[in-house]
């Protein structure tokens, strides 16, 4: 079988061992190149560290090098014969919640690091909650620094128990636990001989085998039209193709489809990727479809099935994460981007703000500033075609853009 | 279920095509920066697929240092002709002639640094609001945090501390007049992905990538092509070696590797076993650890 792709996020607060863990994965999977190794050995020596400090591998921009902390999501790559991996390496501090939300938005799996000595901390709850909020279906809780608690099975079980108690409140169907030492490498790529009591797989084994294709929505046909292709060349004078990325379901040549918002029916006459014809299209493929009749269909519209339609809504009940350093102004107007559609929108009401450490709802302080997560009601100037985010991440997510600064100020997920 | 699994190359391709279509949909005057190297050839191939059966709806822009391998120029011209797209050349020599930039002198002189002002002046002259490039996040540390839609202010500067958040695949290309975006459809590809994709799609690439015999000199642990543009030190002697290039840039700074890989299959095998990152062969990054970051802030691609 061809090598697949897994996107995952690692979040951890300073000193949990996140950089060491990523360095370990890259190092043990032989992704580190000779010149990189020499360069981190030199840097380690300059800092007075013995040997190569693996955590230096993942450190990026100069400002961060100076401060010694990660402040933005960085992407790392490694591959094994089974899979290619994209790591979203996100900072874990509360003041970087928005960065973790960003990294989580495209991840299939989250690694949550827990320091075995400290046990579950506020940040553990926060990271787990963001994982849940962003609809990640798989979570691997790595209990790290097991070498510092004498590889104790008792300590590990305590942490697992405590986490299970808490996670029953989260909607994450697949949660796994692994005792590791990122520093020494135990149970990361190679099984540990220090913890014979642990019989489960190593972290890399889980990453290679976790089944994520089934997480994609293959039931509800959704095809947001991204771009209309009209060659206007002699060879293709009458060609009119609808380009886009399948956001849900399986489209086949011959299928009856319904165009929204117009409500006109048609039939799929061809599907192609580049110049190659295919007989079906599924997420997340980028394809071009042609239809049997010339209907009015353009960017922002959506092809669906008559008997399975998204909700067409102007009043949205959503969770947002505020990304901007300027607080949200009450009644402010935004441009809302949802799939390929853009509409004007206004935040009508802040229902509550979440304390993301305790998950308590705050109903008295409703001011929204950077990193805040809140439940709000939004009114749009025209209907948007949405699904519940938990059912479809592509048609249940949106961003808000400030019409004056043109910056992306919030990310949101729709609950229907 | 397994019917709906995609290989990682298919997934990367779908992502790249999606990004290119977003560019065509969101911008008024987009362009593809074409260096003649394998990455920009891959971007161009993705663009061909993204808009088929129509032509690529944006021009190719080549920033010409004047120190090119002749093979690169021939390749560029053939490709442009077969695609039927417009080619725009921004010439470093023109800027030098107009006195807008000064050429470096000395043994390590290169035109690499003055590519940046040439690119910026080309962007301004044509009022491009999006320039698609072939850069990848895995190439260099500073790039690991790069966005797909990377905002540049009206001085073409990149502000790594203040990048726009980018969530899901909802790219925000809105900007103020004079500002523009650099767009990187290959962000998530690695060098090996590129080669595997070239092999799978059977994409034509310049002959320089394949092992061939060439007159070269060795300098500071690197192998550089001997040419009229390279100033030799008194103790440097050109020699003939079986080499190939892993990246193609300005003739004077692109390092070669000794290699027998004369087919795509052999190149893929070589890259898979390689123990040096590809930019490790470029003199411009060697100048300092933060070299790339500094040039990026100035608007380098
Ligand atoms: N003993 C021990 N130390 C660890 C382990 N993992 C990380 N560390 C140390 O913990 C410190 C913080 O690790 P680092 O990876 O920089 O943490 P980050 O801030 O989460 O990226 C460093 O001194 C690491 O060497 C581990 O498994 N065992």
Image (cartoon, helix red, strand yellow):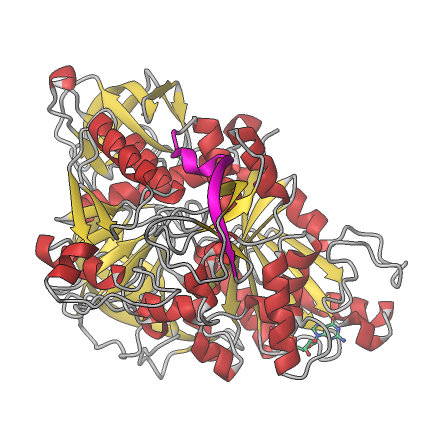
For residue B66, side relative to residue A370 (left or right): left
Identity of the residue drawn at 77% across and 50% down: A201
Q: Along the line of sight, which residue is nearer the eye, B58 or B96?
A: B96
Q: Along the line of sight, which residue is nearer the eye, A183 or B249?
A: B249
Identity of the residue drawn at 67% across and 58% down: A27
- Residue B206 in magenta stretch: yes
Q: Along the line of sight, which residue is nearer the eye, B259 or B163?
A: B259
Split into quadrants, the picture shows ligand 1 in the one at bottom right
- Residue A197 in magenta stretch: no
Compared to A100, does B76 lie above or below? above
**Residue A176 placed where, x, y %?**
69, 55
Q: Along the line of sight, which residue is nearer the eye, B269 or A299?
A: B269
Task: Identify the magenta region.
Answer: B204-219
Q: Is residue A382 visible?
A: yes
For residue A177, side relative to residue B278 (left or right): right
Tally of marks: 0
Identity of the residue drawn at 39% across and 64% down: B108
Q: Quadrant of the N terminus of chain A?
A: top right
Residue sticking out furthest to the front: B234
Identity of the residue drawn at 81% across and 54% down: A191
**Residue B66 placed where, x, y %?**
24, 50
Q: Is residue A166 visible?
A: no
**Residue A340 placed where, x, y %?**
25, 45
**Residue A173 placed where, x, y %?**
60, 51
Compared to A3, does A99 lie above or below? below
């Amino acid at each position: 079988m061809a090598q697949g792709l897994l996107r995952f996020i690692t979040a951890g607060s300073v000193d949990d061992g996140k950089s060491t863990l990523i360095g370990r994965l890259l190092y043990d999977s032989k992704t580190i190149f000779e010149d990189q190794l020499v360069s981190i050995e030199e840097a380690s020596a300059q800092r007075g560290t013995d040997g190569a400090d693996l955590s230096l591998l993942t450190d990026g921009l100069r400002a961060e090098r100076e401060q010694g902390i990660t402040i933005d999501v960085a992407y790392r790559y490694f591959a094994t014969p089974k899979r290619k991996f994209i790591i979203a390496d996100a900072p874990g501090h509360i003041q970087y919640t928005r960065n973790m939300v960003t990294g989580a938005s495209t991840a299939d799996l989250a690694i949550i690091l827990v320091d075995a000595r400290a046990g579950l901390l506020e940040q553990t709850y926060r990271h787990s909650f963001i994982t849940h909020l962003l609809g990640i279906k798989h979570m691997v809780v790595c209990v790290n620094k097991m070498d510092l608690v004498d590889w104790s099975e008792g300590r590990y079980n305590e942490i697992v128990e405590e986490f299970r108690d808490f996670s029953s409140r989260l909607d994450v169907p697949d949660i796994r636990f692994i005792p590791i030492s990122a520093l020494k490498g135990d149970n990361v790529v190679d099984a540990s001989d220090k913890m014979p009591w642990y019989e489960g797989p190593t972290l890399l084994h889980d990453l290679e085998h976790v089944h994520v294709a089934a997480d994609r929505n293959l039931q509800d046909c959704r095809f947001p039209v991204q771009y209309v292709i009209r060659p206007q060349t002699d060879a293709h004078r009458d060609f009119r193709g609808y380009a886009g990325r399948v956001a849900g379901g399986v489209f086949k040549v011959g299928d009856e489809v319904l165009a929204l918002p117009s409500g006109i029916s048609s039939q799929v006459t061809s599907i192609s990727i580049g110049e190659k014809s295919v007989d079906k299209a599924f997420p997340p493929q980028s394809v071009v479809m042609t239809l049997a009749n010339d209907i009015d269909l353009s960017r922002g519209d959506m092809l669906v099935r008559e008997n399975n339609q998204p909700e067409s809504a102007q009043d949205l009940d959503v969770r947002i994460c505020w990304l901007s350093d300027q607080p949200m102004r009450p009644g402010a107007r935004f441009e809302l981007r949802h799939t390929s559609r853009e509409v004007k929108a206004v935040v009508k009401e802040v229902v509550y703000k979440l304390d993301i450490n305790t998950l308590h709802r705050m109903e008295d302080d409703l001011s929204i500033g950077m990193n805040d997560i809140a439940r709000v009601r939004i009114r749009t100037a025209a209907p948007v075609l949405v699904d519940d985010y938990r059912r479809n991440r592509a048609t249940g997510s949106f961003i808000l853009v400030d019409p004056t600064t043109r910056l992306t100020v919030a990310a949101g997920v729709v609950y229907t | 279920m397994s019917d709906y699994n995609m290989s990682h190359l298919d997934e990367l391709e779908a992502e790249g095509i999606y990004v290119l279509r977003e560019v065509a949909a969101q911008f008024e005057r987009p362009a593809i920066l074409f260096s003649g190297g394998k990455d920009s050839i891959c971007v161009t191939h993705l663009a061909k697929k993204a808009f088929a059966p129509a032509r690529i709806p944006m021009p190719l822009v080549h920033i010409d240092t004047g120190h090119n391998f002749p093979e690169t120029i021939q390749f560029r011209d053939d490709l442009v002709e077969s695609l039927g797209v417009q080619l725009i050349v921004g010439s470093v020599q023109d800027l030098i002639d107009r006195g807008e930039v000064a050429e470096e002198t000395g043994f390590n002189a290169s035109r690499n640094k003055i590519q940046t002002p040439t690119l910026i002046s080309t962007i301004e002259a044509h009022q491009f609001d999006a320039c698609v490039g072939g850069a990848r996040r895995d190439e260099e540390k500073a790039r690991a945090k790069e966005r797909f839609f990377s905002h540049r202010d009206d001085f073409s500067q990149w502000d790594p501390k203040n990048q726009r958040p980018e969530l899901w695949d909802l790219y925000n290309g809105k900007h103020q007049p004079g500002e523009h975006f650099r767009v990187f459809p290959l962000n998530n590809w690695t060098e090996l992905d590129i080669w595997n994709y070239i092999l799978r799609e059977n994409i034509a690439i310049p002959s320089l990538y394949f092992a061939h015999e060439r007159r070269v000199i060795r300098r500071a642990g690197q192998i550089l092509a001997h040419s009229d543009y390279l100033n030799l030190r008194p103790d440097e002697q050109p020699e003939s070696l079986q080499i190939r290039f892993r990246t193609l840039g300005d003739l004077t700074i692109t390092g070669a590797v000794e290699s027998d890989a004369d087919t795509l299959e052999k190149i893929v095998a070589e890259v898979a076993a390689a123990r040096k990152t590809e930019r490790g062969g470029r003199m411009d990054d060697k100048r300092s650890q933060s070299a790339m970051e500094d040039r990026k802030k100035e608007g380098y691609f």
